[in-house]
Amino acid sequence: MNDAEYQILLDKCLDGTATEAEHDTAIAAAEQAPERDAAMAEATAMDAALHALELDREAFATRAMQTVTASDAHDRFASGLRRRLERQQAAPAAARPAWARWITGLAALLLIGVGVLITAQWSRIGVDAAPRGALVRAVTGQVRLVHADRTVRPAAGTRVVAGSAIETGADGYVRVQYEDNTRLELTENTSILFERADGARKTLRLAKGGLLADVAPQKPQHPMTVSTPHAHIVVVGTRFRVLAGPHRTTVQNVTGTLQIVNRSSNEHRVLTAGSTAMIGHTTRIVSGAAGSGAGRVSDGLVALYTFREGKGTTVSDLAVFGTPLDLSIRDAAAVAWLPDGGLAVRAPARIASDRPARKIVEGCRASREFTIEAWVRPRLVEQYGPARIVSLAGGAGATRNFMLGIDSGDWPWKHAYVVRLRATEGAGTPGNPMSGPGTVTTRLTHVAFARDRVGTIRLMVNGEDANAATCRFADSRLQHTLTPVRQLPNLCSEWNDEFRLAIANEVGGERPWLGDLHLVAVYARALSQDEVRRNYAAGPPRRKARAAQSNSDS
Amino acid sequence: MKDTEKLRNLAVQAASGDLDAAEELFRTLHGYLASFLFLQGIPRSDIEDVAQQAAIEVYRYLPRYDSKRPFLPWMRTIAARTAGKHWRSHARRHARIDRFREHVRTKLGQWSRAGHLHDLPVEELEQCLGRLPQKQRELLQLRYRQELNAEQIAERLSRTSVAVRKALSRIREALRVCIDTGTVAVTQES
């Protein structure tokens, strides 16, 4: 690498557009040559100084002085008080009469008593490191602890006693730990009441939001209980997640077993490890319809639709991540539920979420990675637009976050799976990832697209690499025609979080797709080739399997 | 920024309770403190708050400052400690610092001993910026005031990102020369 190349690399590191590999290259180059190390020091110092010049110096000085003078006033008051006390101590005790010393002593005793009472009351909610009951271990973002009409912001070490409630805001997170090592993690927009928190008995009321619990073995006669608006969850010792939404509670059990009671139907169920239950006011417990499914990858899953509802106009999001993003079928006459599972789209239909798909955008922003996966059976190979299988966009125009569809335009877009996403130059229309021509058939097909944080993309059809720009197709012209487009560095950073998720069409109905849908999944990470193959090997979800595992669905 | 006698005198006066001197000290230190915190990897959105905390800490400890010793290294120690506290309390939020910034943080001590940071050129830089041609000042504003990266600037100015990076690099070099010599070298736009 010559000096000019090093300088460009350094500049990319400074403006935050370098990849991790480029960071490593720049660091290695600086470590090898002292003059490059010095150049890095000077460039970063200059860059920092230029940043600093854009800040408001006068506002800074004024604000700092306000703090200093305020604290200075306290200091002056404190030092004045100290001087007075020192003077009093220096005065000879004999100068005071005996009755005055008695009154002083009694007053001191009275003050101490009042102090003890106040401290005892205060310690019920204050900072106390005593390992009794539950203690807050970590707090970030907007969090408040409410107890007996008092509200405080908890910190590490704050004791949570019976009757306390913790509420988290949109960016809030709290970790609470009992003395038996039972850990609770509260995610954003959560409200939970600790009805009992004396260590021996743990009774929680989750009004809304998400709770991840890692429960140490409890005495069978004193199990831990979590109540939500829809269910009671009884735990003797396991690791599980609960998400209480306005319409249903989702419970995902990771290890051990849980007992679940549907508060509407009073139905009792045992939830085994790896299973997920969805409990609503009117819906049934759906045990065994795990968010991951047998053999499938579940890590990083942010949205999952398996189309096993069998009836109705709602497609449920089964992923235990954020608030469920259910889809509403607006043209019910255009679709039909398949007996073995799946949704047949027989005429142009609009199937979309009622709310913006923020959890997908936020999940992707956090990881800067993304995977979209689908099990589909196209009704026709000749579909144009491209015809949307899944779309997160404002409409059929170029403003989109991502889209997976099929196209039957002129070569090379003939019968190909096409992906467009806002991570490429030019809003992602020309030269986007696509499979080779002829990949679309009317057979049941597994298609997956993944992009990692350094911009590597992967498009796989039926477990095989199908990216026309990289894989070896019989038609060698593709190699020359499709130059992989340059990917923008920060995937999802500019994604619009107001877009709704749509399947089999755009939200406005401009790009219909016809065929059978068996699964649509979105991951906030790039699945590896092996993981995509694992999902392919697991096959499409079948309604029969659910019926077998959930024989009390009725 | 030079570790001048004036700076040390201001510190001594502020330590003795002279609030005017304290305000002047804060005003003088602001750019230096903020740029040092940038090097510590504090995100721009948090810089003002962390700089405030660091300034208050500096003020608290001023009575312990030995005026026979250099002021800026003493102040950097306090600012680094404040930055460390901020990192610990916001570790979750800022867990994704990139490797380059992490490397810069680990090298700060070494660079400081080598004299690269002793000369964080905030005050001189301000004077040199005024001597730049208008187009170059606009480019710097896009980069540092609007916080656009080279690719976003390139898109806005219909240039390539490589050309923008080269132009920014030349401007920074011209500013470096200006700080050293007091003159602005004429640079070619690409």
Image (cartoon, coloured by chain):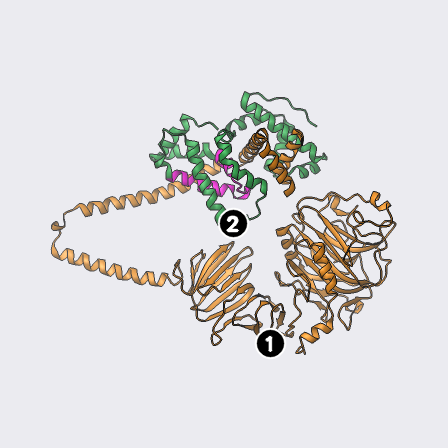
Residue lying at the far front of the rendered structure? A32
Q: Nearer the viewer, residue A206 or B131?
A: A206
The residue at which mark 1 appears reads as A269
Chain bearing tag 1 is A
Tell me the SS state at disc 2: loop
Mark carried by residue B91:
2
In the figure, the shade used to draw chain A is: orange
Q: Secondary structure at mark 1?
A: strand
Which region of the structure is painted magenta? B31-60
Residue in the image at 73% along x and 67% along y: A541
Residue B114 in sight here: yes
A502 or A310: nearer the viewer: A310
Query: The chain shown in green is which?
Result: B
Q: Is residue B80 above or below residue A529?
A: above
Label 2 – label 1 distance at C-alpha: 40 Å
Q: Left or right: where does residue B63 sit relative to residue B122?
A: left
Amino acid of disc 2: Ala
Please say if B155 is above or below B186: below
Is residue A311 in view from this perspective?
Answer: no
Q: Is A340 drawn above or below residue B166 in the view shown?
A: below
Q: Main secondary structure of the magenta part?
A: helix
Q: Image quadrant for the C terminus of chain A?
A: bottom right
Residue at 72% x, 70% y is A308
Q: Is residue A427 magenta?
A: no
Measuring from the top left, give residue A25's x and y in whole percent: 63, 38
Magenta segment includes B41:
yes
- As shown in the figure, which amino acid type bears the numbered disc 1? Arg
